[in-house]
Image (cartoon, rainbow, N blue to C red):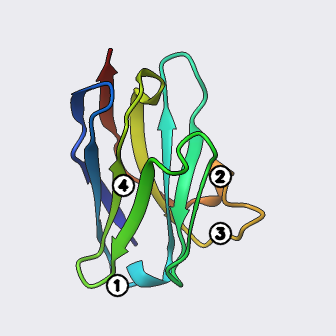
Amino acid sequence: QVQLVESGGGLVQTGGSLRLSCAASGRTFSTYQMAWFRQAPGKEREFVGISWSNGGTYYVDSVKGRFTISRENTAMTTYLQMNSLKADDSAVYYCAAGSVWAATMFREGEYRYWGQGTQVTVSS
């Protein structure tokens, strides 16, 4: 069993930065792939990026070069560093853990554990 708790959301101006944290409990954290999703009002939840258990990362094009996902296995925490924020980045951000593959990482249903979400609002 893994529990995920996000923190770090808030209000920031366009061009600003935020770092979200996702703290996990459970003994198998290091073996899970850790992903970030987001959901804007009136839109479906969308995949943002993933930290693979082997240290690799992947990002969708809309955040590539601006967002960075990292993880500290000893601290059982995943981070989402968001730079050069835009109004379109405003959303509730969720971290998720699961045993996914490259072909399935975009699918919400493939992730077994989810955090409660944290709101990010980017004002222009």
Q: Which mark is residue 27?
A: 1
Q: What's the amino acid at mark 1?
A: Arg
Instruction: Give the SS element for disc 3.
Output: loop
Label 3 – label 1 distance at C-alpha:
18 Å
Label 4 – label 3 distance at C-alpha:
19 Å
Image position, residue 73 (x, y; %)? 33, 81
Q: Nearer the viewer, mark 4 or mark 1?
A: 4
Q: Nearer the viewer, mark 3 or mark 1?
A: 3
The reply to whether callout 1 and callout 2 are in contact (CB within 8 Å) is: no
**Dot 3: within a 10 Å radius of its alpha carbon, few (fewer than 14), some, or many (20 or more) residues?**
some
The reply to whether callout 4 and callout 3 are in contact (CB within 8 Å) is: no
Question: Which of the two labelled residues, at mark 4 and mark 1, occupies the earlier sequence position?
Answer: 1
| Residue 8 falls in image quadrant | top left
Q: Nearer the viewer, mark 3 or mark 2?
A: 3
Residue that label 2 marks? 109
Q: Which mark is residue 100?
A: 3
Q: Residue at x 47, y 57 (%)?
A: 96
Label 4 – label 2 distance at C-alpha:
21 Å
The reply to whether callout 3 and callout 2 are in contact (CB within 8 Å) is: no
